Amino acid sequence: MLFTFILSLISFVVLIIFKGINFTYLNSLYDFISFKTLALLSMFIAVNKSLELIGAFKLLAFYVLNKITKLKTIAILLILICFFSSMLVTNDVALLCFVPFSIYLLKELKAKKFTMQIIILQTIAANLGSMLTPFGNPQNLFIFTYFHLDFLSFFKSTYIYCFISLILLFIFTINIK
């Protein structure tokens, strides 16, 4: 992260040297930053890290392993949990939560050969599920706040795509081999 920050500063300095300082341009860049969106994303990441630190994911893994024994059922559960949780905590945060959980769970089940398939489907699921709500992904947060939409208007424009995606995702999930 520090490396990325340093590269950003270097590119900014290079831009100033070769382009000159245009304070009007810099002001317009500042106007494009959505601090509300950044604050919401930071909050979601903080909640995720808190759940991880208190051991909620390991507890959930032991619970799942005690209740469900079929690999296909666990795969469906892992993929659908990414789909639905991404509607609430953004697609990225859902993946940050459940991919490590899935890797841990599949390792405990000695089913490592299915890990890649399940993670790919979780990634697809998180991105498809996140389209339903304004806080499902950063782009939706921006669109929702920039155009001053209400939740119902946003939901009406996305629910059909999300529903069709869920059906297609389920078809792919039940065919895991």
Image: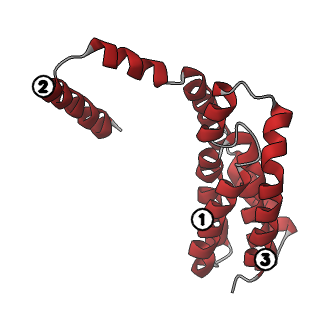
The residue lying at 61 percent from left, 61 percent from top is: 123
- Secondary structure state at the residue bearing disc 3: helix
Q: Position of residue 35 (x, y in %)?
A: 54, 21
- Give the mark, 1 or 2, whose residue is nearer the N terminus: 2
Quadrant where the N terminus is found in the figure:
top left
Q: Which residue is mark 1?
A: 103
Snapshot quadrant of residue 140: top right
The residue lying at 78 percent from left, 48 percent from top is: 158
- Secondary structure state at the residue bearing disc 2: helix
The residue lying at 78 percent from left, 38 percent from top is: 154
Q: Which residue is mark 2?
A: 17
Give the left or right position of residue 17, taking residue 48 as reference.
left
The amino acid type, in three-letter code, at marker 3 is: Ile
| 2 and 3 marks in contact (CB < 8 Å) | no
| Residue neighbourhood size for the residue with mark 2, other residues' Cα within 10 Å, grouped as few (<14), some (14–19), many (≥20) | few
Q: Of 95 and 55, which appears nearest the observer?
A: 95
The amino acid type, in three-letter code, at marker 2 is: Ile
Quadrant where the C terminus is found in the figure:
bottom right
Q: Position of residue 34 (x, y in %)?
A: 54, 24
Outermost residue on the bottom side: it is 177
Task: Please say which color scheme the image uses.
Answer: secondary structure
Q: Position of residue 54 (x, y in %)?
A: 67, 39
The amino acid type, in three-letter code, at marker 1 is: Ile
The residue lying at 76 percent from left, 47 percent from top is: 132
Mark 1 or 3: in front is: 3
- Give the mark, 1 or 3, whose residue is nearer the N terminus: 1
- Give the mark, 2 or 3, whose residue is nearer the N terminus: 2
Q: Which residue is mark 3?
A: 171
